[in-house]
Amino acid sequence: PYRFLPGLDHCCGNIHMLTGDVEGAERVYAKFVDKLRQLKTKKIICWCSSCIVRLKRILDEYEEFNFEVVSLSQYLTENLKNSDFKNDHVNIAGERTFLVHDPCKIVYTGIDHEGPRHLLENIAGIKLVEKKDDPEKELCCGISSPGMHTNSMKKMECRCLDGIRATAAD
């Protein structure tokens, strides 16, 4: 059986950490992990890159989990061959060029270097392009911390957007 745990009602505490509320982060994280353990499931599929990184790369050294954590695109890619997904389920008018901007946390920590690429490659009419030859070396876009070091973040954001524009992706 599948269960959906929506948004901030089930938060890993990353938002609290970004605002400097360490106690709040610990409180909501503990509630989140308790809820995950109560589900007694073998696999947790995370939409949020912060949750994935906190569970798989930061707190897994201190916690023992009875479940595997994967990103949504990892889960979908893993199960694509077992599904009835067909190109005719998606209507792309003519060929369109797509660029995937990966959440840097997932790439930098080595959790998922592929993202939704395998899924998109299975849709007729989609051509994938990359900003660089090696997506693992992609630099931060600067968007995750707009309230801190604003000038630096703005420069990162502009550099990232320039790279995206250079690909001419639709």
Image (cartoon, grey):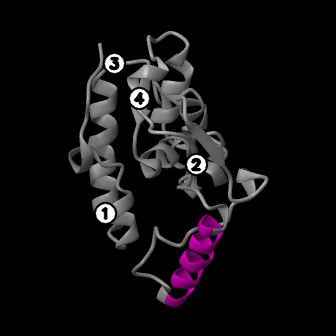
As helix, strand or loop, the secondary structure at mark 3 comes to loop
Q: Which residues are magenta?
A: 151-165
Per the image, the residue denoted by label 1 is 23
Would you name the residue on which mark 3 appears?
40
SS category of the residue bearing label 1 = helix
Pointer 3 or 4: first along the chain: 3
Return the residue nearer the eye: 97 or 66. 97
> What amino acid is labelled 2 in the image?
Thr
The amino acid type found where label 3 is placed reads Lys
Residue 140 on the magenta span: no
Among the two numbered marks 4 and 1 on one chain, the one whose residue lies closer to the N terminus: 1
Report the residue marked by disc 2. Answer: 97
The mark that comes first in sequence, 2 or 3, is: 3
In-front residue for pair 12/92: 92
Could you tell which of marks 1 and 3 lies nearer the N-terminus?
Answer: 1
- The numbered mark, 1 or 2, whose residue comes first in the sequence reads 1
